[in-house]
Amino acid sequence: MVHRIIVINCMVLLTAISASCQSVKADQVWKAQGSNLEVEYRQNTKAVPQYEVFEISFKHENEYVNPFFDVTIDVIFTSPSKKQLRVGGFHYGSSSKPSINKRKTKTDKGERQQISYDFDKQDMWKARFAPSELGKWKYDFVLRNVNGKEVSGSGVFNCVKGRKPNPGFIRRHPTNPFRLVLDDGSPYFPIGLQDCWGDNSGSGSVLDQCSMEGPFRTDRKEPPPLPPGPLFVRGPSENPQNADVYFRRFSQCGFNLYRFSQQNCSYQIYEDLDNYLVQEGIMTDELLCCARKYGFGVFYGIFGYKKVFNGDPYNKAGLAKVKRFIKYSVDRWGAYVDFWEFLNEQKADDRWYEIMVPYIKSIDPYHHPVTTSWERPELDGIEINAPHWYQRENEFESDAITASRAKNWKKYNMPVVVGEQGNHIDKRKPQPPGVGGVWDDRSALRMRIRNWSALFNEIVFIFWNTSYARDGHFMNIWLGPKEREYVRAMQDFAYYLDKDVRMVDVKVSQPKAVRAYGLASKKCAGVYLHHFSSHTKPLKSLRITLDIPAAAKGYWYCPENAAILKTVDVSAGANRLEVPEFTVDIAFLVTQAGPPDIDKDGRPNNLDTDDDGDGVPDKEDAFPLESQEWRDKDGDWIGDNLDADDDGDGVADDWNKNGIPDYEELDIDGDGVDRAKSVPWDVFPLDPKEWRDTDGDGIGDNSDLDDDNDGYSDQEERKRGTNPLDKLSFPT
C-alpha cells in the first residue's frame, strides 16, 4: 500500500464526529398535551432548502406492545399556495442507543455471527417531508394511540432556495419517454451501482464495512490454477473499507444512482409483516443519507426477496399488512428515494399489482416512479421497465447485443433501468483459467462498450458490484479503478449533452467494420463508433455523415481516457466528417459549451497534463482519470492505495515495518480513528490530518472552508451562531 503521508503515533482529539448523515436537531422543544397523552416534539430546522428533508421528532414515554402500530401520526403540510399534502409519521426507535449483543451460531455453512439490538425504551417517532415550493409552510399533526387517545400540535418553517440548490428528485422526461430529468429541469444520465450490506462488525451500522477491489482469493479450497501475469495473483485484500471511501470513489467517477432493497444480499428490515426491526430501520436511514450525501439518486426496493402474498391477492388480511409496510416505507423513506421497486426477481399475480400500484401512488406525496422485478412493463401504473441482464458476450458484439436488447425493452414506451447488470458464467461448466464469475481481463472493456451503447440507446445500467475478490460468485461484476476511469470518461462526455437529446441516424463509410450510434437535440449532438471487426488493428480512412443541429465545435473524444483527439468546425445540416484513426471505439461531441474539461480546472483535456487533478501528471499516473489512485506498482489494475500487496508477490505489505500486515492495521495513518469496524470511522484512512468529511465533497473538514456545503463558510456560521456541520443550520 502506498500512502500520501504517514505519521505513526499521531493522536488527535475527536469532537462531534457524526457517523450518520442525519442533521443535528434544533434546540427548541414544544409540548403537546391532550387525552392524558404527553408528547414533546421538535423540528430539525426552521428553514429548509428546497427538496432537502424537514423532520419532526416526537418523544412519547408511554409503553406499547408494538410501537410501530400502536401509535399513528398524521401530518398535514400546507404550502405557501395553500395546497395540502398528507404525510404519515413512523416509529423511529429510542432516544437512547441500543445494547448490542453478539453470539456465534453453527449453521450448515459453518459458524455465523448473530447480532441483536436491545433498547431500554421505545420513545421516538418521526415525520419527514421534502418541500418543493418556496415560502412559508405550516404543518398540523395528530398523534393517536391504540387506546383511542390523541394529541395534536402544529408548527411552521420556511422553504428557501439555498446557496447550493438541490436539483430535486428524478423524474420522467416530459416529452421523451425514455429519458430522465431532475425536478429543476436539468438532464440526468444515470449509471447505477448496488452492493451487499450488513452490520458485520456488530457496531449498529452497515457503513463501517465495505468491500472494494480485492484480488483472487487465498482461502479457497483446491483453487484452480491461474494464468501467468500480474492480473492473476492470489493475495490479501485491503478490506474492509468504509462507506465514505466507497461512495466517494464511485461518485467521483460519475456513478450517480444507487439501488438497495432489503434481504437482497442485505439485512432484513422486518422479521415478518407484524414485527418491524428498529435498528435495521435506522441503518437504512443512514445508508440512504450517505448515498444522497455523495450525489446518488436512490432506487429503493421495498420487499426484495420477501414473500408478501404475491400469489394470494384475495387474502385481505395479508394484503392489509403488505399495505401497512408500504405506507411505513413511503412515510419513512419517501423523502430520500427517487424510485419505488416493489419486488426483486419475483413473480406476483396481476391482481396483486392492481391493488398495490394504485395504493402506493395514492399515499406518495412525491409521485416517485414505480417499478418491480421481475419486470412487468405491460401493467397499468408501472412507469419504469426494470429487467435484469447478466452476460459474458463476445466483446465485438457488446454494442450490438446492448442495442438489440434496448430496442426490445423500449417497446413499452417508458424509461428502461436495467436493475441488475454484470457478468455471468455457467458454474456447471469448466471455465478458462483466470475467469471468475465477476471478472476476467476483458470485463472492463466489455463494460465500457456496453455503457456507451446504453447511453446512445437511451437505457440505464445498474451494476451489481461484487469486488471483494476477482473469483467471487458466478455472476455480478468486479469494479476497480480501470472500470471507474471508463465510467468517468463517459459521464464527462454525457455532461455536455442536454436533456432533449434523442437517437438519430449516423452513416458510416465502412459498415462492415464499424457500428455507429447517434444522439442529437436542437443544440448539441453526439456519436459513438465501435470498431467491431478488430480491437487490435487501427482503423483508418473512416468517414461518417451526420446532421448537425447548429454550427458549433466538434470534438473527437477517446472513451478510454477522455482525450480530445481532434477539434473541427461543423455547420448546421448534413456534415461529412473524417474520423481520426482509432482501434476499439471513439466518440464525437458537438457542443457550443466549449471543449471537455474532465476535472473542471479551466483547462480542456487536450491541454491539461493532470486530468484527474491528483497532482500526478497523466504521463506518470497509472490511473489518470481516478483521482484517488496514481500508482500500480505490480500492474494488477488495483491502485496501490487500496492494494494490500503492491508488488504482487502474494505476501501482504508491511509499509511501516512493524511486523503487522498493513491490511490488518485499522489505523494505518495513526490519527486515532480506525478505517473500519468502528463508529465513527476514518473517512480518509491514509491521511493523518483528516478523518471526517461532513458534506462528502472529498475535502476533509479540517481543510474545508464550508464543511456542510450549505454555501456559508464555517467562519461565517460561527459568527452568526449556526452549526457549520449541519447543512440545515445556516444564517437566515
Image (cartoon, rainbow, N blue to C red):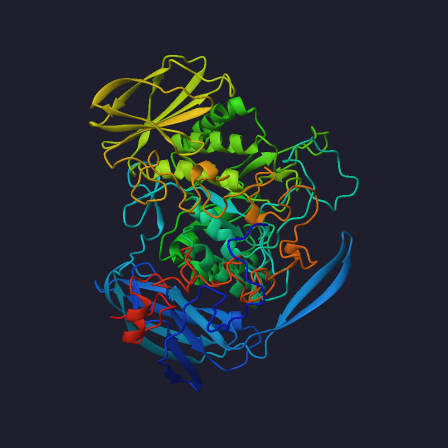
* Residue at image coords 30%, 65%: 713
- Whether residue 139 is visible, yes or no, is no
Give the percent coordinates (x, y) of residue 316: 54, 57
Specify whether 542 is left or right of 109. Answer: left
Viewer-nearest residue: 425 or 227: 227
Would you place residue 692 above or below residue 407 in this image? below
Would you place residue 411 above or below residue 113 in this image? above
Quarter-of-image position of residue 79 = bottom left
Specify whether 459 is left or right of 10. Answer: left
Give the percent coordinates (x, y) of residue 276: 57, 65
Would you place residue 208 above or below residue 68 in this image? above
Give the percent coordinates (x, y) of residue 42: 38, 77
Specify whether 507 is left or right of 61. Answer: left
- Whether residue 190 is visible, yes or no, is yes
Viewer-nearest residue: 76 or 243: 243
Image quadrant where one finds the C terminus = bottom left
Residue closest to the far bottom: 36
* Residue at image coords 37%, 64%: 707
Would you place residue 571 above or below residue 327 in this image? above
Quarter-of-image position of residue 441 = top right
Quarter-of-image position of residue 389 = top right
